Image: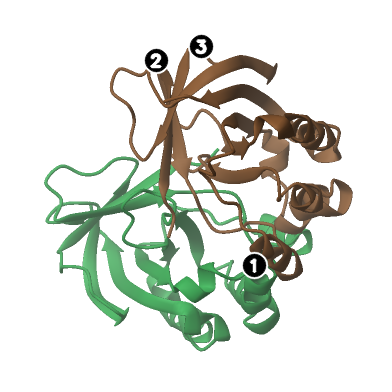
Chain colours: A brown, B green
Amino acid sequence: MPDPIVFSGGSAGTWRVRSQGAIRGEALPSVARLDKGAVPRPSAAWVIGGMTSNLRYTHASEKRVLDATPSVLGRPAATYAALIPITKSAAWWGMAQDERRAVIEDKSRHIAIGSDYLSVVSRQLVHCRDQAGAMFDFLTWFEFAPADEGRFDELLGKLRASPEWAFVEREVELRLEKDG
Amino acid sequence: MPDPIVFSGGSAGTWRVRSQGAIRGEALPSVARLDKGAVPRPSAAWVIGGMTSNLRYTHASEKRVLDATPSVLGRPAATYAALIPITKSAAWWGMAQDERRAVIEDKSRHIAIGSDYLSVVSRQLVHCRDQAGAMFDFLTWFEFAPADEGRFDELLGKLRASPEWAFVEREVELRLEKDG
């Protein structure tokens, strides 16, 4: 079942913000800490949220690879995290399903690239485009060990260089450290 | 952009309920009238809602057929309508994208069947599975002229006989007449 996931930025929360900025488009107001939960944190400076959901592009053969290395959140060694909210363009959403799939995987190898990093980067995709008043289309959450941040940078670099990213019109990045 | 669509069942609203029942699973409480809008109607007996969204299964070649006969809501002659809320099973949502597409179109011809009725049945698909606390996965709304109700029954009969419908675990149907 879909689960609600809410990120509250402010002065309190489990995650300390190490860095925050806009990759493309408008930034989010700077905050010192981030909380991740099922409901908004009272007195947060901003709240963005959505729902986990079913797979939208992954084929059965790719799902078997993902299922063999499930993304486990909350691993004790994974004290670093990143939150990357993204909005794609009207041109993206106006494409048919097979056209979007062609860009995501045939041209960009998004699923295959992500699969290469499953063992070091745990991920959770939160959908928010279909929520009333949503500021972003997706919120992508990553957890990894500090020693693996270079691998995470490599993953981001590959995705951002892919044809799919031509359809990203807003992208914000927060790097976080667990200390709460 | 996704738009919120809300159906309020109760004693008021534009649409008079001609008939109401459960095709599979639990029924909705019986109401005399239905209102369709962007927000809940005050003092409704029940409210179900969601968002219009992007295409999830339709390929470019099929989209060209749909785009050539756009579904126009509110046609003066279309004084009959139907609201069909549906919930699909966990087995459905656990399938990969290509597996769901294979059931919907390769095996069930859902998109092709729907396309055959575009000229007489206007449709709007409202997604609600990704809304917190949703009672259904989809709310399907149809408008047609009274003289075309036989064609609408034919459309429903074909879809309900398809392999895709083995994954439908709850289905409710309201038939409506505009008189407000």
Mark 3 residue type: Pro
- Occupied quadrant, residue B4: top left
Q: Position of residue B10 (x, y in %)?
A: 15, 56
**Residue under pointer 3:** A29
Residue at mark 1 to residue at mark 3: CA–CA distance: 37 Å
**Residue under pointer 2:** A45
The answer to whether the residues at label 2 and label 3 have Cβ atoms under 8 Å apart is yes
Give the chain of mark 3: A
Horizontal side of residue B38 vs B40, given as left or right:
right
Query: Which residue is situated farthest in the bottom direction here?
Result: B161
Q: Look at the numbered disc 3 and give the secondary structure of its residue.
A: loop
Mark 1 residue type: Ala
Give the chain of mark 1: B
Q: Position of residue B156 (x, y in %)?
A: 46, 80
Res A27 visible: no
N-terminal of the pair, mark 2 or mark 3, is 3
Residue at mark 2 to residue at mark 3: CA–CA distance: 8 Å
Give the chain of mark 2: A
- Occupied quadrant, residue B142: bottom left
Point out which mark residue B96 bears.
Answer: 1
In terms of depth relative to the viewer, which is nearer, A56 or A63? Answer: A63
Res A168 visible: yes
Mark 2 residue type: Ala
Few, some or many C-alpha atoms within 10 Å of disc 3 (few <14, some 14-19, many ≥20)? few
Residue at mark 2 to residue at mark 1: CA–CA distance: 37 Å
Horizontal side of residue B155 vs A143, given as left or right:
left
Q: Look at the numbered disc 1 and give the secondary structure of its residue.
A: loop
Name the residue at 15% across, 42% down.
B42
